[in-house]
Structures are given as C-alpha cells and as structure tokens.
Image: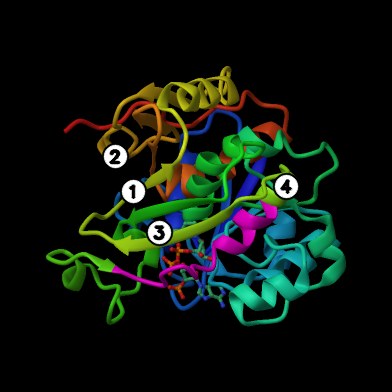
C-alpha cells in the first residue's frame, strides 16, 4: 500500500514517516509540508534516512503517488484537503481534530470553529481500535483520536455501567504535544523547570471523550485537569474512582483481555515503559472504598501516529501490530 504523509516535518508527521519507512507492507511514497516544501526530508529531520523531498501539500500529487494519505496538519487545515483526496478516491487518515466530533454544535463548543463538511463528518470513522473495533472495510476517512483523548477513553470507557456520579482525572503531557514550533508558554525551555496546569476542566479533548462515553452508555461526569510536565514525550493520567481496587482491576483486565497493545497490572505503572512504543499501560491501586487508575502512553505513538498506523493496518487487512514498536527504550 502506497502511503503519503502531509505535514511530514512536524512531530506527528515525522513520527508517521518513521513508522512507514520500516513498515513491511506500507511504503512511504510522498511527503509534503507547508513552508518547508522543496527541502529534503532528511535535511529537516536528519534521523530519517530517505531521499524523499517535501512536496507542496497538493491533493493531485497525493492522488498520483498514494493509495492512502496521513494528514498531520494544524487544526482546521485537514478538512478541505481530506475532502479533495476522498473525491479523488484516496483513503484519508486525519491525525488532527477536524472530523472527530460528530455533532457540529459540540464541535463549535470545544474548538470554537464551525465543523467541516457535514456529510464527511457523518462518514468519518472515529478509530480507537480497542474500544471501537477496526474501521469498516469501506472506510474512506478515519478520524484518529487526540492524545489525551486516547488515554482518557481507554481509562474511562471500562467504567461505563458502574454506579459512579463523577470521575476526577489529573493528567500530564510532555512538550511534543504542542508541536514542533516553539511558542511562549509551550516552548520546552520554559517548561523544563516548571509544572503548569492548563485549561482546567475545559480541555478540548473532552468533547470527543464525552461523545465516546455516551456511546458506551456512561452516565458519570468527568472532571479533567491537564498539566504541562518537563518531559518531551508521554501522557500520564491518574483517575480517582470510588470503587474497590480488586473490582476495578477485574473490570480493566476483562475489558482489555486479548488487546495486544494493552497491559493491565496491579499497582502504579511507569511512563518510561511506554515511551517509544504503541502500548498503553493501565495500573490499578487502592483500598476497599477508593482507588486510583493510572494510564500511560506515548503521545506521538498510541496518542497519534502509532494509533494511525494501527488503524491503517486494520483497514488494509494487516496484523494490528505490524510495523509498530512494542518494546520501550531503557533507560
Ligand atoms: N503532537 C502531538 O502529540 C499530537 C498528538 C495527536 C494529534 N496531534 C495532531 O496532529 C496534527 C499535527 O500536530 P504536530 O504536533 O505534528 O504539529 P507540528 O509539529 O506543528 O507540525 C505541523 C506540520 O504541518 C505543516 N503545515 C502547517 N500548515 C500547513 C499547510 N497549510 N499546508 C500543509 N502543511 C502545513 C507544517 O509544515 P511547515 O513547517 O513546512 O509549514 C508541519 O509539518 C495536529 O492537528 C495535532 O493536533 C498532535
């Protein structure tokens, strides 16, 4: 399968390109960028050993060279390109937020902009394989979940059906979650010696999380406070759940039994054990009355490009884990 990446010099796009360059069944055939078009990918991302030159993000080029296209573009930039590519008969996987929230009013509430093409929004498959299953065979557009959203959904969905009023969640993210361009407030230098909460109780990923939880029949509220941590990669959540720890462990264990990229354990989990992998670790600690659930994943892999390749593997009939790293670097 010939796969192209739009936005290949950004954090997400470069990670997608890295995975595709060593994938046994997918071939990276075209890379594009915005301002960096015309440069060799290896000149802007020296760790990627390829002669591919970054092209302008032109759908006709992708039509000529690709069967599927991964869009790793800023919010709002994907929708028109996705529509054009789909008209040209190409499969699109969007790593951005343009097609994740189905209800246009909810989309406006969380992103402050109007939802793109309504027909495409209805058609888009929200792909979080452990919870939604594989994309249907005829899918033309996959909306890949956000990084915090992936961790929140994996941590909260097994609680649907439990008699809970509210689940409180504290989360941290590394600086790569803010993209490659340094800006005041998100630049790694300003975060490396600090720890900052942001968007308390109103992070935009809550929109897609609540949408998925509603579909699972969950009725509890979610309070979520994210923090910027002095890390480069990684998402780590702590969920506070008023249930006995033994019951909770059983719940998570059976929810993810057989899911190849999930590990459920008793006790805390280390974030370092998932960095560089497409795995999610879930740990459960607590007493008979209250418990905490920990969720750890790599934002650029399971929280983004890794999950994107997982979705494409499933869509193109490949083994789910093909080409995906499952073992972490250490230390
Ligand atoms: N970072 C994460 O952890 C993460 C996780 C999940 C999802 N996402 C989503 O993935 C998308 C990309 O995120 P990122 O962190 O990789 O961002 P990024 O590092 O800022 O990269 C953005 C890329 O888009 C290109 N670009 C910008 N405007 C463009 C345009 N009009 N046409 C074509 N290319 C354009 C840029 O190229 P030039 O530099 O050449 O202009 C750059 O390659 C976002 O929607 C983000 O929300 C990110």
Q: Is residue 109 visible?
A: yes
Tell me which numbered mark, 1 or 2, is placed earlier along the sequence.
1
Tell me which numbered mark, 2 or 3, is placed earlier along the sequence.
3
Label 3 near ligand 1 (CB < 8 Å): yes
Image coordinates of residue 146 in percent, x first then y, are 54, 56
| Observer-nearest of 29 and 19 | 19
Q: Residue at 57%, 20% (x, y): give it.
A: 254
**Cα separation between marks 2 and 4:** 35 Å
Magenta-drawn segment: 197-212
Residue under numbered circle 4: 67
Image coordinates of residue 194 in percent, x first then y, are 16, 67
Residue under numbered circle 2: 271
**Cα separation between marks 1 and 3:** 13 Å
| Secondary element at tag 4 | loop
Residue under numbered circle 1: 234
Q: Of circles 2 and 3, which is in front?
A: 2
Q: Residues within 10 Å of mark 1 (few under 14, many from 20)?
A: many
Q: Of circles 1 and 4, which is in front?
A: 1
Tell me which numbered mark, 4 or 3, is placed earlier along the sequence.
3
Q: Of circles 2 and 4, which is in front?
A: 2
């Amino acid at each position: 399968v010939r796969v192209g990446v739009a936005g290949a010099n950004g954090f997400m796009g470069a990670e997608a390109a890295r995975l595709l360059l060593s994938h046994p069944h997918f071939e990276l055939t075209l890379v594009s960028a915005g301002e960096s078009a015309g440069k060799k990918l290896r000149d802007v991302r020296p760790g990627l050993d390829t002669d591919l030159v970054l092209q302008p993000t032109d759908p006709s080029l992708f039509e000529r060279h690709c069967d599927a296209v991964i869009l790793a573009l800023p919010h709002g930039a994907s929708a028109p390109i996705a529509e054009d590519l789909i008209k040209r008969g190409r499969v699109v996987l969007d790593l951005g937020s343009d097609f994740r929230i189905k209800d246009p009013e909810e989309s406006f509430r969380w992103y402050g902009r109007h939802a793109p093409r309504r027909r495409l929004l209805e058609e888009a498959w929200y792909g979080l394989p452990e919870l939604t299953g594989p994309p249907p065979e005829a899918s033309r557009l996959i909306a890949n979940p956000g990084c915090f959203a992936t961790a929140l959904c994996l941590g909260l969905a097994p609680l649907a059906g439990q008699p809970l009023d509210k689940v409180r969640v504290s989360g941290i993210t590394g600086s790569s979650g803010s993209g490659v361009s340094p800006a005041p407030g998100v630049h790694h230098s300003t975060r490396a010696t600090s720890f900052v909460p942001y968007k308390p109780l109103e992070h935009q990923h809550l929109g897609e999380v609540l949408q998925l939880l509603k579909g699972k029949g969950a009725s509890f509220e979610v309070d979520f406070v994210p923090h910027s941590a002095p890390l480069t990669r990684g998402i780590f959540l702590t969920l506070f759940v008023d249930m006995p720890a033994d019951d909770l462990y059983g719940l998570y264990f059976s929810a993810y039994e057989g899911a190849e990229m999930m590990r459920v354990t008793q006790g805390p989990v280390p974030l370092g054990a998932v960095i560089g992998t497409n795995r999610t670790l879930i740990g459960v600690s607590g007493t008979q009355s209250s418990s905490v659930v920990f969720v750890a994943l790599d934002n650029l892999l399971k929280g983004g490009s890794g999950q994107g390749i997982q979705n494409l593997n499933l869509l193109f009939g490949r083994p789910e884990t093909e080409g995906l790293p499952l073992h972490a670097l250490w230390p």
